Image (cartoon, rainbow, N blue to C red):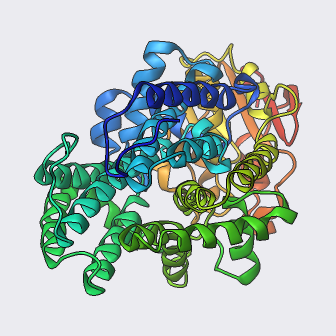
Amino acid sequence: MVRSASPDAVSLTRTDRWIIVAMMGVGAALLSVRLGWQEYWWDEHVTLMFTRAGWYELMVEHWGTDTHRPVYYGLQKAWNALFGDSTAAVRSLPIALSLLLVPLFYLTARRIAPGPFAAIAIILLISAPMFVYQGREVRMYCLANLAMAAALWCAVVLANRARRRMRGGADTSPDAGPSDRWLWAGFAAALALAFYAQALGLFVMTLFGLWILICVGLGVLPLRFLWQGLAAFAFYVLLILPALYPFFIHATGTVGGSFWVPEPSVRFIYDQTAAAYPYPKWSKPVVALMILWGLWSLRDRPHLAWLMGCMVIGLPLLVLGISFFKPLYLARVIAWGSIVSVLVLAAGLVRLPPVLRWGGVAFLVVNQLLAFQTFLPPAPERTPERQIAAELQDFDPGRDVLILGYQMLEPALRWHAPQAFEGAAYGFIYADHNRNVIDAAMRSAFVPRADAEQIALPQTGTLYVVREAELDPSRQVASEDDVTAALGVVTKGLDVARSVTAGPLQLDLYDLEQER
């Protein structure tokens, strides 16, 4: 590889460009393995349910419905309109967004150290477990990661310049790039986009602020850097104003209420942290030591050591601290720190002799690929919801009625059988008080169990009842929350014309023309 004259150089040689293109190609291949085999899980079906909404409904009426703003949902909706709604086509959007991290991380790494550092960083990136997992997932994390990567690049460039000026240097190189003013604006805009994509962007913004305070407080960066950061923060606040009100509503209501994330126990914290670094058990201690070595290796560039430390170690610690008041500690929330850790690992590896360096790269890549295999379905998947939806293809919205024994089945069923939710659709919930945050986006009308008799059925058509024949024991549904009695009230006097069972789900069809 061609060595840069300075770690602050941003101009790319032909070799650099070939490395980026090659790694993006390999990354695309890894992210696409068995892509069409992998069925959607519940959160992904929520994304797809939002994409079924009209544009005004999605971007205006549902602006505050979910805990995150519908920016990613809008992107996914536009993408689906262009490329179709097959599983592979839908998942190709998060892949495309995630692959853009490769050049951003390469440019960031070039600003951190010369030599093979940047190449090692993106080799580790494209096989990093959370990069692969979130790079295939139809959720907003891929967009948030891209925005945070852009903010990270801006921060590294700005900090390097401030550090160099502080030590008596000047921006005399021809690759000085954008002015500080534009970089600070880009930094704020990137963090704002991260917040619009996913609420965790607020945590990362906080960590960037903590990094600035630490570095200025320790004299690593000049006081002027703090004033510039405050100006960028003011611009950031202006940019996110439309998203602040719904964020606080959910922070004090949805997340602050009976949110489903468990209280942080030692076991739960370990499991979620291990899931964010899903290396084989035997290699986890080695990887942890390599991360610590990487941070130590950046000691001659303390402003960058603190920055990487805030992202990799500070993020889980911040989320953990918040979780003692509002439980949020999940692998997906701290995954950004896991992705950034590839830069730290690369920083440690380049300090080793060539044999140990490339042996360490091989060790990490092999372990990452072992973790990668656990994300791949061994065979084409077909969920029970898809099988039930196939039975709803003859549903006539003008005369038929759909009742869900568990309203949370709607996102999956509505994706596969949207016509079933264009007519009369109703849904029960096991605990009437435990309604989901996305209830406003659902087409099925929520009905309390005590009001089951108020559902008026027509005299013609077919009644479709979808329920869980086998309750999920992990939800610990109390017997008094069972909807069986409510369903019995609705179907009283009707005989089942046909039943279909798919896994834990059961579809019962009733002929409404029979005497009752």
Q: Horizontally, is 252 left or right of 319 in the view?
A: left
Q: Horizontally, is 171 left or right of 422 in the view?
A: left
Q: Which residue is depicted at the point 33% across and 81% down?
A: 214
Residue 390 in the image, given as x and y percentages of width and height: 74, 19
- 280 or 142: which is nearer to us? 280
Quarter that holds the C terminus = top right
Figure check: 237 above or below 122: below
Figure check: 181 above or below 315: above
Residue 393 in the image, given as x and y percentages of width and height: 68, 15
Figure check: 509 above or below 446: above
Q: Horizontally, is 284 left or right of 142 in the view?
A: right
Query: For residue 22, what is the image quadrant?
Result: top right
Say how many tags the image has: 0
Residue 189 in the image, given as x and y percentages of width and height: 23, 50
Does residue 319 appear anywhere in the picture? Answer: yes
Q: Which residue is depicted at the point 56% across and 37% down?
A: 138
Q: Which residue is depicted at the point 18% across and 74% down?
A: 226
Figure check: 157 above or below 45: below
- 245 or 102: which is nearer to us? 102
Q: Horizontally, is 24 left or right of 14 in the view?
A: right
Q: Which residue is depicted at the point 70% across and 28% down?
A: 463
Does residue 250 appear anywhere in the picture? Answer: no
Residue 12 in the image, given as x and y percentages of width and height: 36, 33
- 417 or 300: which is nearer to us? 300
Query: For residue 245, what is the image quadrant?
Result: bottom left
